[in-house]
Image (spheres, rainbow, N blue to C red):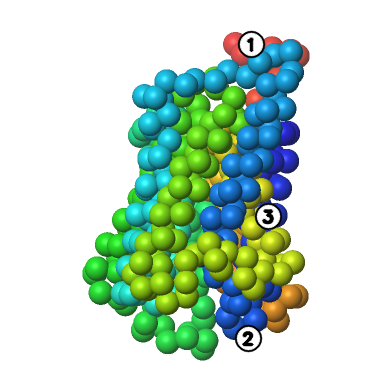
Amino acid sequence: MRTFIVAAVLTLFTSSLGILTTVSQTSGGYKYDSATVPFLGELLKLLVSTFLLWKESNTPKLPRITTDWRSIGLYPIPSIIYLIHNNVQFATLTYVDTSTYQIMGNLKIVTTAILFRAFLKKKISKLQWMAIGLLTIGTTVSQVKGCGETDCRSLLAAPIQGYLFGILSACLSAMAGVYTEFLMKKNQDSLHWQNMQLYVFGVLFNMIHLTMDDILGAYEKGAWWSRLLVGYNVTTWLVVLNLGCTGLLVSWVMKYADNIVKVYATSMAMLLTMVLSIYLFNFRPTLQLFLGILICCMSLQMYFAPPQSLVDLPTQPTTDTAEPHRT
């Protein structure tokens, strides 16, 4: 039940992130430097994790903390993978259109399941593999536009480099998630201590990213720390808060649940965002959206429900008396 509640809250936070980011725009753009938002999100997660670890240290049962440098040295790897992944995403978008990019993004559902099975040695039944396939189909169907809204010839008609980058992006996303789950479960260390290690390197790599952007831009806008909070308003801070809470929830899921729960939460969040956009941004609902939601709900039931509850096996009739002997 606790995993279900955390996954539901993660779905709500993930869904609201896109909506809050859209609302934070002014005249189709940002008055603030959008690159500073992930940095502040990582910093918030680090501060919250530090506080929670301090609070946990003041309890009778002291938290378990591993300070071996060979263990700590594993924690920069997810940040490095995500840094490469972000650059691959930009490279992908130079070859494919937005619709194709969104559809190809659903490959990470399958790649996550494959790496989850291969590297973490987690068993996935045939029924669950079918559910994962349905989830991929459902999210893809919900994103396909009708031929009356867009040129169908442009859909999935990109150069081969675009597809290769898309596959690489899906693999990197899955690799980062599976590796993070491995880190969180490799020992019984405090969740807050593990988060601190992750977010220290997250803050560091974001600072390096901001500094490199300034250097490549010849400091045209000044140093990143001088414009850190310029243009921020209440909605922008809500985006930062959302990023922080989402990251902490994902860490909990990786520690106490698994990557598949995260995949379902983020997929359902995408569908929830589309539904909310109907009321908030006058988004026109499509038949594909409703079909996608239906398929994803079926997938959710297939994956997590006990197998015996999905199959209504006929019961053999019983007789109290034996059949009379014929002579």
Q: Secondary structure at mark 1?
A: loop
Residue for point 74% across, 66% down: 234
Secondary structure of the residue carrying numbered label 3:
helix
Residue 295 in the image: x percent, y percent?
A: 58, 58
Q: Nearer the viewer, residue 103 or 40?
A: 40
Which residue corresponds to the image point at 43% horizontal and 50% vertical from the top-left?
205
Q: Specify few, some or many for label 2: CA neighbours under 10 Å numbering under 14, 14-19, or 20 or more.
A: few
Tell me the amino acid under the disc marked 3: Leu
Camera-nearest residue between 184 and 147: 184
Q: Position of residue 156 (x, y in %)?
A: 35, 74
- First in residue order: circle 1 vs circle 3: 3
Residue 256 appears in view: no
In the rendered image, which residue does mark 2 sit on? 27
Q: Which mark is residue 325?
A: 1
Please say whether residue 209 is visible from this viewpoint.
Answer: yes
Amino acid carrying mark 2 in the image: Ser
Q: Which mark is residue 241?
A: 3
* Pick the front one: 154 or 50: 50
Q: As shown in the figure, which amino acid type bears the numbered disc 1?
A: His
Mark found first going from the N terminus, 2 or 3: 2
Q: Does the residue at mark 2 contact the one at mark 3 (Cβ under 8 Å)?
A: no
* Quadrant of res 48: top right
Q: CA distance from mark 2 to mark 3?
A: 23 Å
